[in-house]
Amino acid sequence: MYPCVYDYEDRNHDENASSSEISTFDVPHFRYIDDDDEVCRGSASYRYVVVSGTPLKILEHLLSDLRLDDQRGAPESRESEMLLDDFLLTYLVFMSTHDLCQALLGQYPYWGQEEGKDALFRKRKVLQLVSHWSRLYKDFLKEEEHVRSFMKTLYRCVLEDLYEFPTLEKDLKEFQKLLRRRHKQMYQQLSLKENCLQLRSPQIETREVICCVYVSSDSYLSVHTHPSLEAHELLRIVGLKMDRAEEDMVLAVVSHTGERRVLQPSDCVYSESLTPQGKLVACRRDLTEILPPLTDSAELSRRPVRLLGINTWDVAAALTHLDWSLFKSIHEQELVYYTLSRTPGSHTAALSVLLQRCNEVQQWVMSEVLMCVSLNKRVQLLKKFIKIAAHCKAQRNLNSAFAIIMGLNTAAVSRLNQTWEKCPGKFKKLFSELELITDPSLNHKAYREAFKRMKPPKIPFMPLLLKDITFIHEGNKTFHDNLVNFEKLHMIADTVRMIRHCQSNEVIGVDSAEVRASVNYLHIIDNQQTLFELSHKLEPRA
C-alpha cells in the first residue's frame, strides 16, 4: 500500500471523460491504493502531493520529491520545499523527535538494502533533509539527547559509506560543518580535531530573563536582565529604582513556610533552583520589608512619578527595543511546543519571557496609575500612557500597544471616573481609536487588518497568535482513519511562519540607555485586592 494523491494538474483532463476514468479534484485528494491498482499503473504524468498519510509514508514522499542542491530549479521544487517546511515545523503534532530520528535512520540505506545510484541518491537526500532540519531549528534541538545520538549514528554511517561511495565526500564535509555549528561538543567527542580549542572555551549565556524581586508584601520589581546576574548587582538596581541605600539591604529567598535564607553578594540570583523554594525578596538587614503594604497612602504620597518627565516617543521606543530583543530570539517551533504542552519549559523559554513581559506591561500600567495619589498627576499619566500606546502602534509593536490599552481598560482603572473626566477630549478620542484594535468581534478583524498592512519588522500580539494555533490544533483532527491530516499541519505551519515574516528585517526603533532603564525595571503590584483597594481609596464609591 502507498499514498496516491491527485494534484491540481488533474483539472487539465478532458471535461468529457467517462465515469470509468479517474475522478478529478479541485482540492488535492488522498487515498490508499494497492500496488497492482490499474489507476496508478502508467500514470507517470500525474504529480502526487501528500495531504494525509502515515508519518513514514509522508517521510518517504518527502525524500522522493526532495531536490538535491545540484537539482534545484525543477518545477516541483517550490511545492516540495513548502511541504518539507510544513512537515519539519509541525511533526511534533503527530510524532516525537525520537520517532523522527529513527524514521530518518530507517530511510538511510544500509549495506545490502539498495545498490548503486539509487542508494547514493537516497543517502544524499537523507543528509540534505537533516541539514534542512538543522538550519530551520538552529540551536533549538542541540540539547536533545535523541538528536545527539541520531547525529552520531548518521555521521558514522556516512564515514563507513565513503569507501563505496566516494562522491559522498562533499556531503560529508557539509555535514561536518553542520555538526561544528550546531553540535560542537558532540563534534569534539567524535574526535574531529578542527576547532577543538574553540570548543573548550566557556559558553557565554546570551538569553534574556525576567527576574522578579519582591519589595513589599504585594508588589515586586521586574528586572529584565541576563541569567548570570549576581545579588549585589540586583541590590544596586533595587536601590536606584526604590530610592533605598544598597548597603542597607540584603536579598533573601523566602520559602513557602516563611523561612528566609540570605544570599551572599556574589550569589547568582536567577537560579532555576530558587523558584521551587520560594520567592526572591529585597529586605532590610533585620529581614523586614523595605516597603510597607502599598495601601499605606502616606508612603505613596512621597513616591515620585518619574514617567511624567520622560518623552512618550522615547518610552515607546524603549518598550519596542526590549520587546524586539525578546521577539527576535523566539524560534518558530516554540509556538508548536507551547500549544502542545501548555506549560513553560526549556523549549519555550524565549516565548514564555515575552508572554510574561506582555502581562507585566499591563500590570505596570495599572500599578503606575493606581499608585499616583495626586489627581492632576494621574490625569497626566493617563495622557502619557495613551500616547505611548499610540507610539507603540506607530512603531509596529502591537504586543506592548495591546498590553497598555488592556491595562487602562481594567476595572480598577476604568472605574476612576473623576480621572477620566478630566482627561482632554482629544486623548479620549485617541484612546477610543486605539481600543478598536483590541475589539474581539469578527475574530479580531480590526487587529488582523491593521497588522496585515504593517511591513516587517513588526511585533504581533503573541497571545492572539497562540490562540490561533490552539484553535487550529483543537478544532481539527490530527488523524483521519489513522492517517495524519496534513491539511491541519499546513494551517499550523502557515500560522507559525508569521514569526519568520515578522522577523525578516532588522531591529526596530532607537532609544537611549537612560530611557531604556525606565522600562527594563518595572514596579508592579501583583495583588488584585491591593489594586482595587487603591482604586477605591483614590475615588471612593459615590
Image: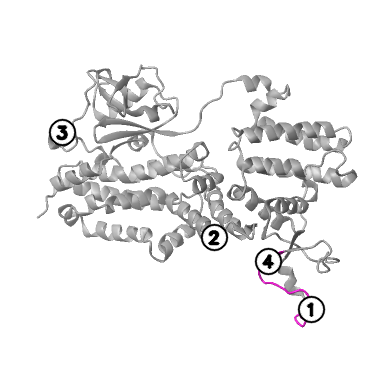
- Provide the residue designation for mark 2: 476
Element marked by disc 1: loop
Badge 4 crowding class, 10 Å Cα cut-off, few under 14, some 14 to 19, many 20 or more, is: some
Disc 3 marks a residue whose amino acid type is: Glu
Viewer-side label of 3, 1: 1
Number of marks in the image? 4
Q: Is residue 178 visible?
A: no
Circle nearer the N terminus (4, 3)? 4
Quarter of the picture containing the C terminus is: bottom left
Q: Are marks 3 and 2 in contact (CB under 8 Å)?
A: no
- Marks 2 and 4, Cα distance to the nearest angstrom? 18 Å
Mark sitting on residue 28:
4
Disc 1 marks a residue whose amino acid type is: Ser
Circle nearer the N terminus (2, 4)? 4
Which residue is nearer to you in this view: 508 or 521? 521
In this image, 256 relative to 541: left or right? right
- Residue range (magenta): 15-31
Viewer-side label of 4, 3: 4
In the picture as drawn, the residue positioned furthest to the bottom comes out as 16
- Marks 1 and 4, Cα distance to the nearest angstrom? 20 Å
209 over 464 or under it: above or below: above
Disc 2 marks a residue whose amino acid type is: Asn
User: Residue 420, image x and y in percent?
Assistant: 19, 55
Mark sitting on residue 299:
3
Instruction: Identify the residue at image location x=71%, y=50%.
Output: 56
Mark sitting on residue 20:
1
Quarter of the picture containing the N terminus is: bottom right
In this image, 290 relative to 338: left or right? left
